[in-house]
Image: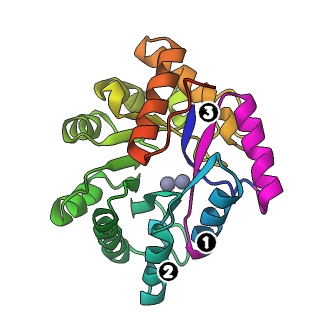
Amino acid sequence: MLDAHTHLDACGAAGPEGVAAIVDRATAAGVMAVVTVADDLDSARWVTRAAEWNPRVYAAVALHPTRATALTDVARAEIERLTAHPRVVAIGETGMDLYWPDRLAGCAQPDAQREAFAWHIELAKRTGKPLMIHNREADREVLDVLGAEGAPDTVIFHCFSSGSTMARLCADAGWLVSLSGTVTFRNARDLREAVPLVPLEQLLVETDAPFLTPHPYRGAPNEPYCLPYTVRALAELLGRPAEELAHVTTANACRVYGIPDTGRTL
Ligand SMILES: [Zn+2]
Ligand SMILES: [Zn+2]
């Protein structure tokens, strides 16, 4: 399996040893590679270093929508520079978050988020790297910006948590839907109805660690080794063998991120 979206720095990995420890635990559970995702500028610098420290780590860089006000000219220039790193496989996480602005002091407001999202879309198009979208309670706003700017070739909705309408839209547009531990929660009814509407070739799996720990460890810190619980829950939801889901989601991730698919030989 491949963890399509995780945050190794937030999991507590400061240096090469910390990264290796997490990746080794993941490997023992069959998770052979991870994409570690930046949410601010420090993190963007860190994830590219982590990808150099360990051959099983790839990176994605962007400013998180809640931090959109930090996207100064200097920050833009640095993100662009980091994007050129050969182990940076996506522009993310970017998008829109309407949950936090009223709850978190200093959180970027929707206007600033929209502008930063548009800039990241343009960067994804220019670099040809996939756009990795964070969408929290912002279906309409995300679609608005994508429509206005024009979507890049490859679009990934990380931690997909929308309902059937959005799932159908993603399916038709050829966009990827990345599922996290929330798919294992029995009470996520809308999500569990939405997932079967997406073709297998458009599904990814992720931990978004250290957040969103899958059942049965809900509430405990999440790590990439927890990914198989999400794969099993997804398989059960779709009525297919877990091995098939592991294989297909890995092939999908390798295809969209341009990572060699080593699954067959390991
Ligand atoms: Zn996110
Ligand atoms: Zn994330």
The image shows residue 219 at horizontal and vertical percentages of: 70, 40
Q: Earlier in the sequence, mark 2 or mark 1?
A: 1
The image shows residue 25 at horizontal and vertical percentages of: 77, 37
Which residue is at 56% across, 29% downward?
Answer: 230
For label 3, the crowd category at 10 Å Cα-Cα, with few meaning under 14, some 14 to 19 and many 20 or more, is many
Q: Secondary structure at mark 3?
A: helix
Question: In which quadrant of the rendered image does the C terminus lie?
Answer: top right
Question: In which quadrant of the rendered image does the N terminus lie?
Answer: top right
Q: Amino acid at mark 3?
A: Leu
Q: Secondary structure at mark 1?
A: helix
Q: Can you identify the residue that label 2 sits on? A: 78
Q: Can you identify the residue that label 3 sits on? A: 227
The image shows residue 227 at horizontal and vertical percentages of: 62, 33
Gap in angstroms between the C-alphas marked 3 and 1: 25 Å
Query: Front-most of 99 and 118?
Result: 118
Residue 28 makes an appearance in the image: yes
Q: Is residue 137 magenta?
A: no
- Left of 17 or right of it: where is 39? left
For label 2, the crowd category at 10 Å Cα-Cα, with few meaning under 14, some 14 to 19 and many 20 or more, is some
Front: mark 3 or 1? 1
Stretch in magenta: 12-41
Q: Earlier in the sequence, mark 3 or mark 1?
A: 1
Which disc, if any, is residue 45?
A: 1
Q: Quadrant of residue 7?
A: bottom right
Front: mark 3 or 2? 2
Q: Earlier in the sequence, mark 3 or mark 2?
A: 2
Gap in angstroms between the C-alphas marked 2 and 1: 9 Å
